[in-house]
Image (cartoon, rainbow, N blue to C red):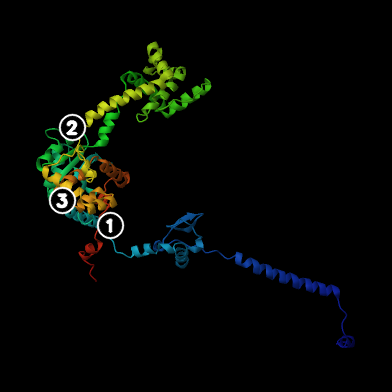
Amino acid sequence: MSKQSQMTNFFKQPHNTSTSDNQNSNITKKHNLDTTQNVDEPSLKKVKILKYKDSYVKYGFTYLNENGKDVPQCVICGMTLANASLKPNKLIRHMETSHAHNEHVTKIKKIPMSNDTISRRINTMSNDIENQLSEKIKKSIFYAIQLDESTDINNEAILLMYVRYVDTDLNDIQEEFFCCLNLKTYCTSEEIFETISSHFQKINLQFSNCIGICTDGAAAMTGKFNGLVTRVQQIAHKNIISTHCFIHREQLATKDMNENLFDVLNICIKIVNFIRASAVNTRVFKVMCEEMGSGFKNLLLHTHVRWLSRGKVLTRLFELKTEVEIFLRDKKSPVSDYFENNVWLAKLAYLSDIFSILNELNLKEHLGRLREKMSKYFDPTKDIRKNCNWVINPFVQSDQNILSLTNEEKLIELSADVGLHEIFRSNKNIGQFWIKVQNEYPSLAEEVLKLLISFSTTYLCENGFSTLTTIKNKTRNRLEISSAMRISLTKSIEPRIDEIISHQQQQPSH
């Protein structure tokens, strides 16, 4: 080693800027490279895609496939979560935080049920309600029925019956859904009677206490010789009251109309229906009216209910008579020939111009003919309310009351009772009042209950058929609806759940 090199070891070397900068630059680049590698390292890792498992259904989740990934979807709220949430703990957390109020669903899921458990329990509750109703009817002094038949969505003939009776437990007159029966073949009076008789025998109920029957005006129901009412009258209470539904009679009485207007109106209805019944015809006629600059773009529909507004239909038709004639001829409709009949056009013009006056005349004539029709359908000689004002208020004196001598004396005695008068004033329910005095004045109460228990319309049956169409629809046309109808339509009777449970056999342990 030279002396010069040995001597340099004892002196501080001068700072070399370029060398230092190069070294620092290399270090910085190396550091930056390492940092970049550390940042990019996580992105290079492969993200794990979770798969849906069938066992996740118990947590209340199904799944959807979005962009090739399974995403969980809540079956309650329909919310979809991220793919990373396909883990039991995250699914459970969603149910606990978002659906904590559905704890009862979890409790119901714990109840063991077979495929027919629900239907069996519905039948059990229905049978219990039927048994209670049968016992109440048997305790009642009288009962009345209303019935009607119709067809369901499955073209099966259904007979609905309602019953009104004295509920001794509630001390009031109650009306309840009685039964829903199937008519197997023809809806004749014989088949209806046999079906009802079989049901009465099944529940051990006698016709002898039946004091009222209400039906519609069908021949099978009201036939003079072989109708259902006639058959029931032969075995029911001797003073049974048969009623043709007031609603049906009112409809029959009020649908009459002046004959002079009838022909013109019928032709107008045909013309309007030809145009308005078809969506295509309606649109084409509207476009044609717009092109011709007509004041109106369409015709008015006729309705049987608002018969006093029929003049507007005729007026609109007359104002658009040119457009209607062109349209009908283009469609080659035979009713277009009426627009060539000057007499018919004159009638239409006359009616459309002065129909306001004709409305008044028609109203007066309609009311006069309505009175005649009402007398025909509601015979005053058969009005069971006649001379029965004492039923509504026994404390008002009236010379028109027709009672036996014994009952007349009892009525005078009752009307003089100050205590009963106070009870009558405080209680607005007439039925409850007469039930309270039944033990003290049995003969008077019996006469009253005969009238109060009887039905005047079949409205309840019509309402029951509305419920039937809701329960038994296209998607449930094989449903056995008798038990479901009873539970849906029964108002005052509840199933005795505790008693039902006590008779059920508990599941044995294994």
Q: Amino acid at mark 1?
A: Ile
SS class, disc 3:
loop
Point out the frontmost of discs 3 and 2: 3
* Badge 2 or badge 1: first in the primary sequence: 1
Q: Amino acid at mark 2?
A: Thr
Q: CA distance from mark 2 to mark 1?
A: 53 Å
SS class, disc 2:
helix
Residue 413, placed above or below residue 216: below
Q: Residues within 10 Å of mark 2 (few under 14, many from 20)?
A: few
Q: Position of residue 462 (x, y in %)?
A: 27, 41
Q: Where residue 441 is drawn, which disc sits there?
A: 3
* Quarter of the N terminus within the rendering: bottom right
Q: Amino acid at mark 3?
A: Tyr
Q: Where residue 118 is drawn, which disc sits there?
A: 1
- Tell me if 134 is positioned left or right of 489 in this view: left
- What residue do we see at 51% from left, 22% from top? 295
* Badge 3 or badge 1: first in the primary sequence: 1
Residue 13, placed above or below residue 73: below
| Image quadrant in which you'd find residue 302 | top left
Q: Residues within 10 Å of mark 1 (few under 14, many from 20)?
A: few
Q: Position of residue 107 (x, y in %)?
A: 35, 65
Say if residue 166 shows up in the picture. Answer: no
Q: Which residue is mark 2?
A: 381
What count of labels does the image hold? 3
Q: Position of residue 213 (x, y in %)?
A: 18, 41
Q: Position of residue 265 (x, y in %)?
A: 36, 21
Point out the frontmost of discs 3 and 1: 3
Contact between marks 2 and 1 (CB within 8 A): the answer is no
- What residue do we see at 22% from left, 57% from top? 124
Q: Residues within 10 Å of mark 3 (few under 14, many from 20)?
A: some
Residue 100, placed above or below residue 356: below
